[in-house]
Image (tube, rainbow, N blue to C red):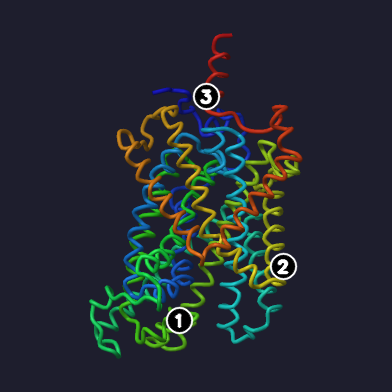
Amino acid sequence: MSTEHTAPATEDGAVNEFGYKQELKRVLRLFAVFSVAFSIISITTGIFLNFGFGITHLGPASIWLWPIAAVGQTLVALIFAELATRIPLAGANYQWGARLVGPRYGYVVGSLGIMYSAVGMSGILLLGASPLLATVFGWNVGNPRLLLFIAIVLIVVAFGINLISIQLAARVNGVAVVTEIVGTIGLAAVIFVMWVVDGSPDGHGLGFLGDTETLPGQPLWYAVVLAALIGVYTLVGFEAAADMGEETINARRTVPRAIILSVVISSVLGMLTLIGFTIAIPDLAAVQASPVPLADITFYWLGDTLTKVLLLVVVFSMFALTVVAAAASARLIFAMARDNLLPGSTALRRVNPGTKTPVAALLASLVICVALMLYGYANGNAFGTLVGATALLPYLVYFLTVIAYGLRRRRMAALPDAFHLGRWAGPVFVAALVWLVAVLAALILPSEFRNATYVALGGLALAGFWYVVGLHKRLRDGTAGAMTLSAAGADRSRSSTR
């Protein structure tokens, strides 16, 4: 095995060895980094938005597709945990692709990552948090101008928190961890206990969790593919912990732990939440027809007040997800601009000397998100298609990153006391690759998700346009792009012989 780079003596050396200067402030410890990943996964958001979709296409048995997604994503997380020890840099997926394969490959990965963050944040706030908040306070949910205003206020506040400091963003996410566990998962447990004590109106038992119910004319296998969306959609974003690598204390040890813990804990708690809410369904047909099935279940068992509490917890989870997604998106833009890959890279790579935050990158991400919200306001149905792409885009990023790992993993030296898959690297890589191919097929082939594929292709076309008109010349001239691990190793070897 090659030993192209070894562990640096200092935290700053972990950045300097890749040709950068330490500019971001190292303040995050394990719980803060775990909170980032846990909040961006946000089982509350994912389950709330997709529970009805799974129940409608497959019935109560749809919840058992969650553990399959959990195992598959844990395999991906193990690979990312190893990569985080070797390349602990901001804009993680971009850096991994660029360092392992090359700058052009990294540019594609990074472009997909920017698209995913922007579409996801805008869609969740405009189509999720905004109408829920209006419902709680009794405002007119049918007023699109009001919903747009609420969404813009929420996203401006989320980015404003990041502009102040990464510590404040971490505190928000720390609170979100508590609200997710106590608010959503605790509520599901209470409802489950009430079902045990009182029983449901139709008298169903635990066997209800295995019932299947497909739509007329829909084959069972097709229903399974569609119902799997709840886990596939939710258990993503754990690599955000690695995006904070340059702001994490003892990053090579802390970040891998945060990645793995966030996936495992989210998977277990999410499954318990699904069981609690599903077994307590009072009327399956009514829940399948409801636009907010979890709220209907809660209202039946606990009444209006606690239902509003649930909705507020969901809104806060969506807001916290946006806070951390804004941080991750800005770090990705900052990382790519630092390698001169983006238009306006000189401004986008600047870090505020006082707050130690990439202000220009944060503002650029905010502008993109607001522009997408305005587009959604003018073209509501079209924006729904864009939001559908949030299920596809992260898996394209994961697929490309895992491919890069498989091609170049033997070039990465094992570091002392750092997470390493060892002899399991090959089997984990193969299993993760099979899983990602299956998910991509499930997200591309069904007609229900077809428009999301067109969105991803359109985004890649825009990235290709910038490559042709601007980036290609920079890469050809050597003024853009990060060095691959092999090139960096060769440079160090030449330096050591001088």
Measuring from the top left, give residue 158's x and y in whole percent. 62, 62
Tell me the number on the disc at residue 295. 1
Query: Which mark is in front, 1 or 2?
Result: 2
Q: Earlier in the sequence, mark 2 or mark 3?
A: 2
Tell me the number on the disc at residue 374. 2
Q: Is residue 197 above or below residue 463?
A: below
Q: Could you tell me how far apart the alpha carbons at marks 1 and 2 are, in whole angstroms?
A: 28 Å
Q: Can you identify the residue that label 3 sits on?
A: 486
Q: Is residue 268 above or below residue 142?
A: above
- Which image quadrant for residue 137? bottom right
CB under 8 Å between callouts 1 and 2?
Answer: no
Q: Could you tell me how far apart the alpha carbons at marks 2 and 3 are, in whole angstroms?
A: 44 Å
Element under disc 3: helix
Q: Quadrant of the C terminus?
A: top right
- Which image quadrant for residue 373? bottom right
Neighbours of disc 1 within 10 Å: few (<14), some (14-19), many (20+) = many
Residue 33 horizontal side relative to residue 498, left or right: left
Neighbours of disc 3 within 10 Å: few (<14), some (14-19), many (20+) = some
Element under disc 1: helix
Q: Amino acid at mark 3?
A: Ser
The residue drawn where x is 41% and y is 42% is: 79
Q: Is residue 126 above or below residue 477?
A: below
CB under 8 Å between callouts 2 and 3?
Answer: no
Q: Could you tell me how far apart the alpha carbons at marks 1 and 3 are, in whole angstroms?
A: 54 Å
Query: Which mark is in front, 1 or 3?
Result: 3
Tell me the number on the disc at residue 68. none
Q: Amino acid at mark 2?
A: Leu
Identify which residue, 280 or 260, lies in the foreground.
Answer: 280
Q: Is residue 368 above or below residue 353?
A: below
